Amino acid sequence: MGKGGFQKHKQESFIQKVLKEKKERSVNDPERLGNFQISLQYYNDDQPSEHTLLTWQNEGLLADALDVLKGYCQRS
């Protein structure tokens, strides 16, 4: 070994970079703390009839689901 031993790797590793980006996008980020988002991007209209939004609406379940989501948004 040369004088001073090993030198620390100065370039940020791929894993460190991904973890840093993930931390920056965290839902605990103060800018996003009051926000709650859902996505219907993968909603599948081909679900059995008991799992459609119309069925949920007719059975009163859609309003219940929205009330639950509203509760999540109001948490502080």
Image (tube, rainbow, N blue to C red):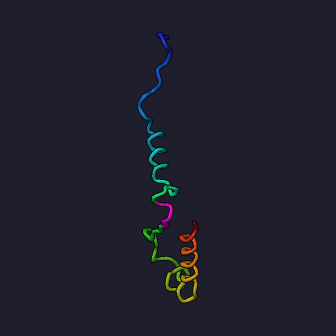
Residue pictured at 46% horizontal, 50% vertical = 24
Residue visible at 51% across and 58% down? 27
User: Which quadrant of the figure has residue 42?
Assistant: bottom left
**Numbered disc total:** 0
Describe residue 62's horizontal placement relative to residue 12 as left or right. right
Q: Position of residue 56 (x, y in %)?
A: 54, 83
Whether residue 35 appears in magenta in the rendering, the answer is yes
Which residues lie in the magenta part?
32-36
Q: Nearer the viewer, residue 55 or 12?
A: 12
Q: Is residue 7 above or below residue 50?
A: above
Question: Is 65 placed above or below 13 here?
Answer: below
Camera-nearest residue between 50 and 58: 58
Q: Residue at x 45, y 68 (%)?
A: 39
Residue at screen point 44% across, 35% down: 13
Location of the C terminus by quadrant is bottom right
Q: Looking at this rendering, what residue extends furthest in the bottom direction?
A: 58
Quick check: is 38 in the magenta stretch?
no
Q: Main secondary structure of the magenta part?
A: loop
Q: Nearer the viewer, residue 52 or 30?
A: 30
* Rendered position, 48 above or below 12: below
User: In the rendering, at what x and y percent does residue 5 appear?
Assistant: 50, 15
Looking at the image, residue 57 lies above or below residue 46: below
